[in-house]
Amino acid sequence: MNADTPSGIAVTRCADDSRRGDILALVHEAFGGLSPPSGALNETIDDVAARFAAGPVLIVEAGGELIGSVYGAVKEGGLYLTRMAVRPDWQKCGVGRALLKAADGEALTRGLRKLTLRVRINLPANRAYFERAGFTVTGQGQDLGRSPYETMERPLGVPVA
Ligand SMILES: CC(C)(COP(=O)(O)OP(=O)(O)OC[C@H]1O[C@@H](n2cnc3c(N)ncnc32)[C@H](O)[C@@H]1OP(=O)(O)O)[C@@H](O)C(=O)NCCC(=O)NCCS
């Protein structure tokens, strides 16, 4: 697989509150294709505001359009990533890998040790994707009324394959 960062895209930390609506729409579009449906589809602009308050929000743009995003929050010495989303017409072009590279840099800058995330057990393709990107499974869990998940992490400074 070619996992080079596509040319013409820019990954930045978003500090602009006015992008909240665009990010919410992107997350809904990206997660809309998942089966069983994701709780991400129930999130509102207030949830996006809470993510902005919790930690860095990384976005990817191409030609001024938002094509990718991920929320970060500092947790237990790591940068915990949630709702990583790539616009469907940009998937499998390296945008997700570019977000992971940027998250790695963001975590290093903050003196953290690792990237962490959760994947739903009923989405094995997502687990495989993050394993190929260097994550390993560290545990399992389940919140009340939600699908069971696995926790994953990867050390920092390791090239994203
Ligand atoms: C999961 C998700 C974030 C991945 O983002 P993405 O941009 O599609 O991922 P990438 O392009 O970086 O990598 C996808 C594959 O394309 C390959 N690829 C990367 N650049 C490529 C290129 N230029 N040409 C062809 N293939 C390429 C990668 O090697 C990777 O292969 P792999 O799956 O065998 O590892 C995205 O599919 C998404 O938004 N999914 C819906 C929401 C979701 O499930 N989020 C994660 C929740 S845990």
Image (tube, helix red, strand yellow):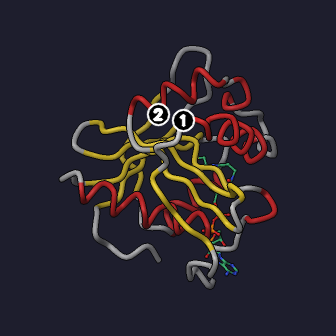
The disc at residue 52 is 2
Q: Are marks 2 and 1 in contact (CB under 8 Å)?
A: yes
- Specify the label residue 17 is tagged with: 1
Q: Residue at x 64, y 25 (%)?
A: 45
- Classify mark 2 as within 8 Å of ligand 1 or not, answering yes or no: no
Query: Looking at this rendering, what residue extends furthest in the top direction?
Result: 144
Measured as percent of width and height from the top left, residue 94 is found at: 62, 72
Q: Position of residue 82 (x, y in %)?
A: 51, 41
Q: Considering only vertical position in the picture, is 119 above or below 17? A: below
Q: Is residue 74 left or right of residue 152?
A: left
* Mark 1 neighbour density, 10 Å: few (under 14) some (14–19) many (20 or more): few
Chain-order first, disc 2 or disc 1: 1
Indicate the quadrant of ligand 1 in the picture: bottom right
Indicate the position of residue 14 as horizontal and vertical percent values. Answer: 49, 48
Picture quarter containing residue 151?
Answer: top left
Q: Quadrant of the N terminus?
A: bottom right
For badge 2, the amino acid type reads: Phe
Q: Residue at x 51, y 69 (%)?
A: 132
Residue mark closest to the camera, 2 vs 1: 1
Residue drawn at point x = 51 percent, y = 61 percent: 99
| Towards the viewer: 112 or 54 | 54
Residue 133 position within the rendered picture, expressed as x and y whole percent measured from the top left: 48, 67
Q: Nearer the viewer, residue 125 or 89?
A: 89
SS category of the residue bearing label 2: helix
Q: Is residue 157 left or right of residue 15?
A: left
Q: Residue sitting at 22 percent across and 54 percent down?
A: 113
Three-letter amino acid code at the position of disc 1: Asp
- Determine whether, in the image, residue 85 is placed left or right of residue 108: right
Q: Nearer the viewer, residue 154 or 92?
A: 92
Cα separation between marks 2 and 1: 8 Å
Count every numbered label the image shows and give the total: 2
Tag shown at residue 83: none
